[in-house]
Image: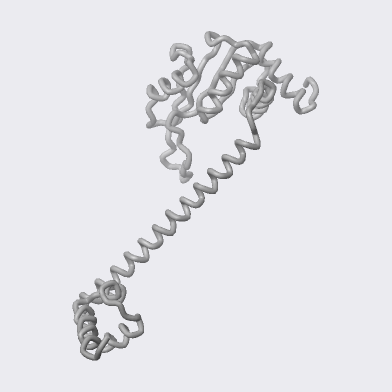
Amino acid sequence: MGYFGKLEEKLKVQELRKKGLSYGEILQQVSISKDTLSRWCRDIVLTKDQKKRLVENKMYGQRKGSQIAAENKKRKRFLRTKEIFEKSKYELGKLNKRDRFIAGIAFYAGEGDKTDGKGGFANADPKIIKFMVKWFKEFCAIPLSKFRGAIWIHEGLNVEEAKKYWSILTKIPENQFHKTYVAKNKIKSRKIRKNIHQYGVFAIRFSDSNKQRRIIGWISALLGGKIS
């Protein structure tokens, strides 16, 4: 580039700077080094409004950059979690009947009713509830007509919608549900509930003391215990 070409380029750069454009914006229009740009524009004084605009744009750029970084981090975490889940699924393999039997005993040991003669299991996870309904049918030979459902839900959530949801999931008719327990919101409490289950916690109940004691016996055998 000759002298006049260089001068023309310099004048263009200075004109852009006088209009309040940032160095980054100018470099998008003119192919020069940042050092040259800085040298050509160092004596140009920007107005108060122009400086304010540049500061606002910089702050916006920083926020935008942070958002992009956060999204990238979130996506990487999602892909890493997906990879772990796929590996876990492969490690577990396909469950056979005995695997399902042991899994149900373990679930009941954690969330089942241990009161002598009272059969019941409660959880908020629909996948676990669905598994346990099938488990009670398969391994305890409990017919659908013997099941009773119960919902524990927070005040302000849709009770009727919750009944419909759990009834469709479990195939237990709503007329076999006990009265729903609605937990009142504690207005004065400082505790913040992080997990509010839309459909509440669902309990599968059945009245068959012998079968409940049999389950407790399976748990005892699994853990190497004795009759208490």
Asked if residue 112 is positioned above or below residue 29 in the image, the reply reads above
Tell me if residue 152 comes above or below residue 77 in the rendering.
Answer: above
Q: Provide residue 111's location: percent of width, then percent of height.
A: 61, 28
Q: Does residue 64 appear to the left or right of 44 in the view shown?
A: right
The N terminus, quarter of image:
bottom left
Q: Position of residue 4 (x, y in %)?
A: 21, 89
Nearer the observer, 179 or 56: 56
Describe the colour scheme in one phrase. Answer: one colour
Q: Quadrant of residue 104?
A: top right
Q: 53 or 6, which is in the foreground?
A: 6
Instruction: Describe residue 197's horizontal placement relative to residue 147 as left or right.
Output: left
Total labels: the figure holds: 0
Depicted 76 relative to depicted 175: above or below: below
Q: Residue furthest bottom?
A: 3
Q: Nearer the viewer, residue 167 or 115?
A: 167
Residue closest to the far front: 2
Q: What residue is shown at x 45% (from left), y 30% (from top)? A: 183
Residue at 28 percent across and 69 percent down: it is: 56
x and y, in percent, of residue 136 in the image: 61, 17
Residue 137 lies in quadrant: top right
x 48%, y 44%: residue = 191
Vertical placement of residue 2 versus 194, above or below:
below
Q: For the C terminus, which image quadrant? A: top right
* Rendering coords of residue 145 (x, y %): 53, 8
At 48% from the left and 26% from the top, the residue drawn is 152
